[in-house]
Amino acid sequence: MIPLSISPSLRRVGAWLWLGLVVLVIFGSLSPRFGPPGAMHADKLLHALAYGILTGMPFAGFCRERTVIVAAALMLPMGFGLELAQDFVPTRMADAADALANVIGVAIGAALGPWWRHLANLWLTARDNRAG
């Protein structure tokens, strides 16, 4: 994996942002009154987008390879677990198509993650060159 030179303060911001998005997805998934729009299967797109971002973000914000892989890999059981947990939430129900959209999002995020890491390195290098 391409090394990522990122300042500790920027790394903390990225970690908190990622964690905040994870909490937002958990809250949205388990809230009885909140759900993505079902019209024209837009909710499947939102599922894939959310899990793609949550899987790809660690590539661009976390330095250690093991942390990146663990954070990204945890999105699969999170997606399945939240779908199953929705059966216990009033007005919500588990949906295999939503779980599949989560898996597709994870796959896309994992595939694009190294590219996002490359873009983060380009941005950090350009920023450092301007500052120095």
Image (cartoon, rainbow, N blue to C red):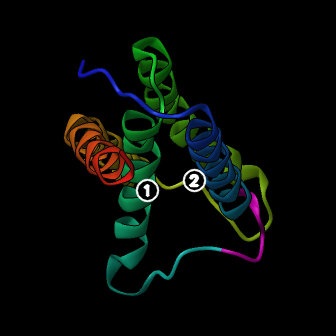
113 with respect to 13 (left or right): left
State the residue in front, 24 or 129.
129
Report how many numbered discs are placed on residues in the image: 2
- Looking at the picture, how far across and down is residue 52, in whole percent? 36, 50
Identify which amino acid the numbered label 2 is placed on: Ala
Which residue corresponds to mark 1? 98
Identify which amino acid the numbered label 1 is placed on: Asp
Quarter of the picture containing the C terminus is: top left
Label at residue 24: none
* Cα–Cα gap, marks 2 and 1: 8 Å
State whether residue 9 is above or below residue 97. above
* Label 2–label 1 contact, CB within 8 A: yes
Instruction: From the image, give the main secondary structure of the stretch colored magenta.
Output: loop
- Looking at the picture, how far across and down is residue 12, in whole percent? 65, 38
- Looking at the picture, how far across and down is residue 82, in whole percent? 63, 45
Question: Would residue 84 be visible to someone looking at this image?
Answer: no
Which residue corresponds to mark 2? 94
Q: Secondary structure at mark 2?
A: loop
Which residue extends farthest front? 132
Q: Local crowd at mark 2 within 10 Å, few (<14), some, or many (≥20)?
A: some
Q: Nearer the viewer, mark 2 or mark 1?
A: 1
Question: Would residue 73 be visible to someone looking at this image?
Answer: yes
